[in-house]
Amino acid sequence: MIEIRELHKQFGSLKVLKGINLNIEKGKVVVVIGPSGSGKTTLLRCLNILETPTIGTVKIGDVALNFNQKVSKSEIQSFRKLTGMVFQNYNLFPHFTALENVIEGPVTVKKMRKDEAKQNAEMLLEKVGLKEKINQYPFQLSGGQQQRVGIARALAIGPEVMLFDEPTSALDPELVGEVLKVMKDLANDGMTMIVVTHEMSFAKEVADEVIFMDQGKIIERGTPADLFSNPKEERTRQFLNLLK
């Protein structure tokens, strides 16, 4: 489903990703953990091509991009449609209602008819528990509700893969649960997901695999039971001990 080969990302002289190799099967939930600056968010942004990899290849389904050579804008745009991304800070359009925020992508990116996009958006907002909030603006919504609109917006383009970058980090603790519930429902529906998070309880409960990154590399990967209970690498043990 997802294949990443020898993926590198460099900003000037700073090497942020140093040869990432990763396979993820369709329908799996992979949680990425690690200290700040380890490259977790950059990895997601390279999968969404918000950051252009320096070298390497990424493939989702039958669509592949080879950054060892020049990649065209049209190839990137086509590839980007395969992924939906949910950010830390919602990134909603403040002058659009919840419904309008969800409609925008399908109409603009996929050229969907507005009536069809509206029907789809209403269904998705109901799915994330916001049926009664469709005509409210972001300032009228709690942080958790805004993030759920963000999830509905990402789903609206019909992605093959959902990418979550610390989706609960900006939320008050009492609002975290409502966002995690929506993510658990998506996992149960069989959505392929890559989640960067500090919510270890979510990782233990929902992830099929946990990846620990440090200094731009994958240090260790395994099932939640194996990685959390019996990590093989000393660096993984050091990181997990800090969380206790």
Image (cartoon, grey):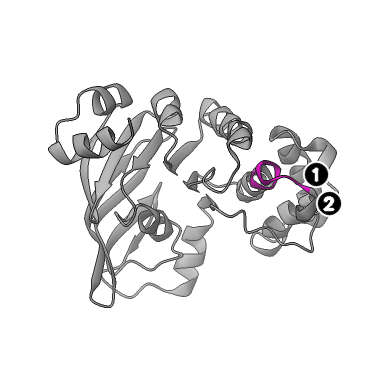
Labels 2 and 1 touching (C-beta < 8 A): yes
Crowding near the residue tagged with mark 1, few <14, some 14–19, many ≥20 C-alpha atoms within 10 Å: few
Q: Which residue is mark 1?
A: 119
Residue 164 image point, x, y percent:
49, 46
Amino acid under disc 1:
Gln
Q: Is residue 136 left or right of residue 104?
A: right
Furthest-bottom residue in this view:
12
Kindly identify the residue that appears in the image at 69 percent across and 46 percent down: 149
Kindly identify the residue that appears in the image at 40 percent across and 32 percent down: 200
- Which labelled disc corresponds to residue 148? none
Q: Quadrant of the N terminus?
A: top left
Q: Is residue 109 left or right of residue 56?
A: right
Closer to the camera, 144 or 192?
144
Closer to the camera, 153 or 42?
42
Q: Secondary structure at mark 2?
A: helix
Q: Which residue is mark 2?
A: 115
Q: Secondary structure at mark 1?
A: helix
Crowding near the residue tagged with mark 2, few <14, some 14–19, many ≥20 C-alpha atoms within 10 Å: few
> Distance of mark 2 from mark 1, alpha carbons?
6 Å
72 vs 160: above or below: below
Q: Quadrant of the C terminus?
A: top left
Residue 1 lies in the magenta stretch: no
Kindly identify the residue that appears in the image at 63 percent across and 32 percent down: 178
Instruction: State the image quarter where residue 30 is shown.
Output: top left
**Residue range highlighted in magenta:** 141-147
Kindly identify the residue that appears in the image at 34 percent across and 42 percent down: 33
Amino acid under disc 2:
Asp
94 vs 241: above or below: below
Q: Tell me which secondary structure the magenta stretch mostly adopts.
A: helix
